Image (spheres, rainbow, N blue to C red):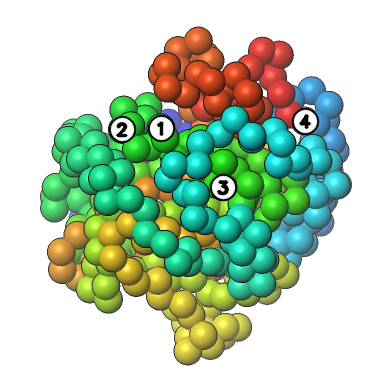
Amino acid sequence: MTGRADLNIRRLANKVLPRPVVERLSVVAARQKRRAHEKRLDEAPDRFERAYAEYWQTGVVPDDAEELLFLATWSSGGTLPRRLAGERGNPFDDAGFAAFGDDLLGALDPSAVAEGVDADGFFVAPELLDGGVVDDILATLDAGPAQPRGDGLGTLPPGPPAPTAPTWWMDPSDSVRSEGVRRLLHQRNLALAGGRYLGVDPMIMSVVLWKSFPRTSPDASSAQLFHYDNDRASFVKMFVYLTDVDDANGPHTYVPRSHRDKPRDLLHGQRLADADVARFYPPEGWKRILGPKGTVFFADTQGFHKGGAVVSGDRAIFQINLASDRFGVAELPLGPAASAPDDLTPALGSAPRYFSQLYPQEPPTP
Ligand SMILES: O=C(O)CCC(=O)C(=O)O
């Protein structure tokens, strides 16, 4: 069944069936999916290695890249894709980003980011992002349209974020209407932090902007239960809080040092209960990232993490994900390079690969 048909059936089921029945059906479906995946784990490393090698020759991402990456990650305890990314990736050279700006993240130390994330899986920057930039990004999100998301949510039209859904996600093509977002996309210290941490030439994988509202329980589809990401072979995310974040409005929680070898029992790809994670990583060690608006932090979200459920108030957050390459989850491009906003054109001209997921090149660059 195609993803879209699957989604339509789930939407219909959400509308016509009682909530407990929908929940029971999704547990059964998840169990079946997991069993089907388990049968393919033994062959996963070879299949991934072949497909990934071919990608590096052609620049073409196969349709099953996301699944190949996921199974190879699971079967290798989280180690194989990252290792191959290091071996296959283009060497990183600071000089490739010399034309980028320093106006927003000039105080950020890219080596401190790389060392911090390498050691713990996350790093909180000592400086806040400029308040005007934070307000500009938040105003863009608040104006909408954003897409509602939530467990068992019926059909709600896109619009400005509101408490009617647990979370609202802005399409990247709308997020780049914010001048602050566009300026962040070509900050030199961001690119250098990504390159030094990944150890290979980085590229922007995605730009994500969303707002969360109170619910009585954590929302699984809004990433409020523990999980690990598997979007690319190797990647690191920069997050910026756009609102003050305390214990009540959904702090990001990260399990320190879970970004390397991981217990295979936790890698089946479905959301994890706190108790599952606690079997391997004691809760006293989990890091809750609190901070005023403008707080910038980095995380390798191949480690276990979750957004906190919002109890009161709301939380808005922005994220840029830097990755080793494009092999993995399909991300919609923003358009051809010629359609890029004028203020991105010089950066795009000087570092086309960095922008090639957003503004693809022809022929495709690996
Ligand atoms: O909302 C959060 O803090 C969690 C975000 C998340 O899971 C992710 O970006 O991968």
Asked which quadrant contains residue 34, the reply is bottom right
Q: Which marked residue is nearer to the observer: mark 3 or mark 2?
A: 3
Please report whichever mark, 1 or 4, sits nearer to the chain's N-terminal start. 4
How far apart marks 1 and 2 lie (CA) works out to 6 Å
Residue found at x 35% / y 44%: 209
Task: Verify CB contact (< 8 Å) between mark 1 and mark 2.
Answer: yes
Instruction: Quote the CA–CA distance across marks 2 and 4.
Output: 33 Å
Seen in the picture, residue 167 relative to 184 is either above or below; the reply is below
Q: Is residue 140 above or below residue 58?
A: below
In this orientation, which residue lies closer to the viewer: 350 or 80? 350
Marks 3 and 4, how far apart in space? 28 Å
Q: Amino acid at mark 4?
A: Tyr
The mark lying in front, picked from 3 and 4, is 3
Name the mark nearer the viewer: 1 or 3.
3
Residue at 53% across, 20% down:
346
Residue pointed to by mark 1: 182
Residue 131 as seen in the image, left or right of residue 115: left
> How many residues crowd mark 2 within 10 Å: few (<14), some (14–19), many (20+)?
some
Is the CB of mark 2 within 8 Å of ligand 1? Answer: no
Q: Which mark lies nearer to you, 1 or 4? A: 1
- Three-letter code, disc 2: Ser
Q: Nearer the viewer, residue 111 or 37?
A: 111
Foreground mark, 2 or 4?
Answer: 2
Q: Which mark is residue 55?
A: 4
**Residue 152 shows in this picture:** no
- Return the disc, 3 or 2, that comes first in the chain's sequence: 2
> Label 1: how many residues lie within 10 Å, few (<14), some (14-19) or many (20+)?
some
Q: Which residue is mark 2?
A: 178
- Mark 4 residue CB less than 8 A from any atom of ligand 1: no
Marked residue nearer the N-terminal end (1 or 3): 1
Q: Residue at x 32, y 69 (%)?
A: 291
Residue bearing the label numbered 3:
189
